[in-house]
Image (cartoon, grey):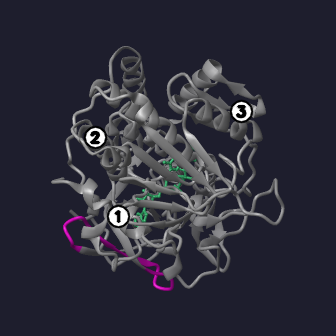
Amino acid sequence: MSIPGADDPVDGHGARPPRVVIIGSGFAGFHTAKSLARRMRGAVEIVVVSPTNYFLYLPLLPEVAGGILEPRRIAVALSDALPSCVRHAPGEVDDIDLDGREIGWLDPEGVQHRMSYDRLVLTAGSVHKVMPVPGINQYAVGFRGVPEALYLRDHLIRQIDLAAMCDDPRERAARCTFVVVGAGYTGTEVAAQGQLFTRALARSRGLDPDEMRWVLVSRGEVLAGLDAHLSRTADAVLRKRGLEVHTHETMEEATEEGVLLSSGERLPTRTLLWCVGVRADPLIESLDIAVDGGRVVVHETLQVPGRPELYACGDAAAVPDPSRPGEYTAMTAQHAVRQGALAGRNLAASLGHGSARPYRHRDLGFVVDLGGFHAAAAPLHVPLTGLPAKVVTRAYHLAAMPGNRLRTAADWALEAVQPRQSAQLGLVRSPAVPLDTASPEVPQHHLGFPHASGPN
Ligand SMILES: Cc1cc2nc3c(=O)[nH]c(=O)nc-3n(C[C@H](O)[C@H](O)[C@H](O)COP(=O)(O)OP(=O)(O)OC[C@H]3O[C@@H](n4cnc5c(N)ncnc54)[C@H](O)[C@@H]3O)c2cc1C
């Protein structure tokens, strides 16, 4: 498939309306397209280039791995949620000619395309931050998309199925031990949801749920850097539930047998999840523009210095944080949404519609779902725990999702009255979820614990 007219020569300001190309359909890209389309009312051509034809609501991804939500609930089709004037070019941008104002993109069938632009928006998000820890590329999996969530869900089911049939107590203990490194919201929520899921699976397979050992390893506190109330609550809930929380510790090595912690403790395991931070998408590094910590440096209007036709926001951009002078905004969905909306406004202004504004924000607080009846929330910095926090958390997510709300709410309602589904479909093989997407030299057939890969 190709975008009609996308490969046409362009005269910049000829008969056709200006073309705005947005790289990425995540929080920032999606909201840029939505805001721009609303303001321009057809007086612009908007093309979103993205490998997926959906917007992924990442905060609920742990619930997919935990068997609560089906993946399509949090994957909202762009064609359903964006105005019809926004077109989707399925593929990945692999070349940007800033001087020639042209991008190159590869579609899913391997066909290369080129497309000119009048304005370009860099919203390619972020990728895993991989540290030089021996063995992680071979034995750890990350958690950033639908393939990882489906892989993990199947992997957890497989470990419990195999543990239930295993006579060797050491192997059984390893299969029932799950190690998560990194206690940001990804690691914390995956561990919280995963533990409840494996306990439910254990019960259904005749195993003792207390045999399920979840270990959360973190250099800092749980949810460090977010609200202090959230951090304390999450830590207390997880420990009370039997999760082993190892703060101020690191993982030193991963081997076929398990992992070694900085305390010297060795944990035999078949499951290692790497949730240690993110860095801006490597596409950014290939450009001849100023970056800071891998993120594109932008003015507070989200424009790239010296390139007024180029905008960046979300995780990929180093946006000055007005509430913390000298620092950049954190890599969060909240910022990405608001920056996307502002990018749409400022792009429209640059095309003669309305006026531009600098990035300003008011922190609305955070919510963290810890599974079951537990959550920690601080809406507008009012600390909540337990059921009230759970209600606020779910209401927040439903309000923030751009679609599929009813289906998501229906899954939640079903979860309350039905056991989680535990069929292992095995559709995603471990080579499909490499941790280091920027390192093609990683031997793919070694990814994941060999014992864990099985026939899938
Ligand atoms: C599991 C998980 C849970 C999270 N939970 C929370 C939470 O509870 N609260 C919170 O505030 N934040 C949370 N975050 C962080 C939040 O999701 C990110 O800050 C947010 O997604 C950033 O938005 P973005 O648009 O910059 O990037 P993304 O949402 O990552 O979108 C990037 C887009 O760019 C596309 N792309 C990448 N490279 C290319 C290319 N070369 N060509 C074309 N397209 C490309 C991607 O496919 C994707 O569509 C979570 C993150 C994860 C992974």
The residue that disc 3 covers is 378
Question: Is 110 one of the magenta-colored residues?
Answer: yes
- Does residue 152 appear left or right of residue 213 in this picture? left
Q: What element carries label 3?
A: loop
Which one is nearer the viewer's eye here, 380 or 429?
429
Q: Residue at x 42, y 78 (%)?
A: 102
Q: Please state which amino acid type lies under the numbered disc 1.
A: Glu
Q: Are marks 3 and 2 in contact (CB under 8 Å)?
A: no
Given the current orientation, which residue lies at the most extreme right position?
Answer: 325
Q: Looking at the image, is 11 positioned above or below residue 250?
A: below
Quadrant assignment, res 304? bottom right
The residue that disc 1 covers is 256
Which one is nearer the viewer's eye here, 285 or 421?
421
Q: Is mark 1 on a helix, strand or loop?
A: loop
Earlier in the chain: of badge 3 and badge 2, it is 2
Please provide the residue range marked out in magenta.
96-111
> What separation in Å lies between label 1 and label 2 (alpha carbons)?
17 Å
Q: What element carries label 2?
A: helix
The residue that disc 2 covers is 163
Residue 352: give x, y in percent of width and height. Answer: 61, 60
Residue 53: give x, y in percent of width and height. Answer: 32, 51
- Does residue 123 appear left or right of residue 77 in this picture? right
> What separation in Å lies between label 3 and label 2 (alpha carbons)?
39 Å
Residue 399: give x, y in percent of width and height. Answer: 54, 30
Which label lies toward us, 3 or 2? 2
Q: Please state which amino acid type lies under the numbered disc 2.
A: Ala
- On the question of residue 219 being in view, the answer is yes
Image quadrant in which the N terminus is located: bottom left
Which label lies toward us, 3 or 1? 1
